[in-house]
Amino acid sequence: MNELVRQRATVSYALLLGVTLVAFWLTVGHGGAGLSESQALIWTQIIVLAFVKVRWVLMDFMELRSAPIGLRVLYELWGVAVASVLIAFAWLVT
């Protein structure tokens, strides 16, 4: 049991669960969706948390951490670009 807790995948899973709970609290639990003046800020936080989660999954569970540096840089640039576009849309729409 002690070996299972020390594995990287187990720690990553626990952190992903924690980030999911924070995202849930920001949207549903906190009631921030009803505040029109701060919707863009809340959506920005959610998008950043989603980007962090996608990065953790790809790095730890799809083994991008040990991929060639070119592929890793390409993914990082893609992730930042997608997150930036979504954040821009969140600020333009609200």
Image: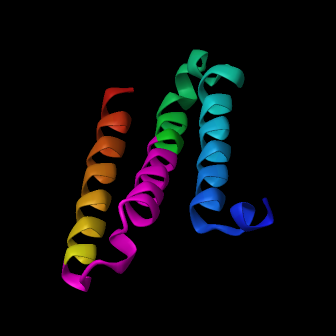
Q: Residue at x 57, y 60 (%)?
A: 9
Q: Quadrant of the C terminus?
A: top left
State left or right for residue 19 relative to residue 30.
left
Toward the bottom, the furthest residue is 69
Q: Quadrant of the N terminus?
A: bottom right
Q: Nearer the viewer, residue 72 or 63?
A: 63
Q: Is residue 34 above or below residue 75?
A: above
Q: Is residue 77 above or below residue 53?
A: below
State left or right for residue 34 relative to residue 75.
right
State left or right for residue 81 relative to residue 38.
left
Q: Nearer the viewer, residue 15 or 42?
A: 15
Toward the front, the furthest residue is 1
The spot of residue 50 in percent (x, y) is: 46, 45
Task: Provide the major secondary structure of the magenta segment.
Answer: helix
Q: Residue at x 27, y 75 (%)?
A: 72
Q: Which residues are magenta?
A: 47-70
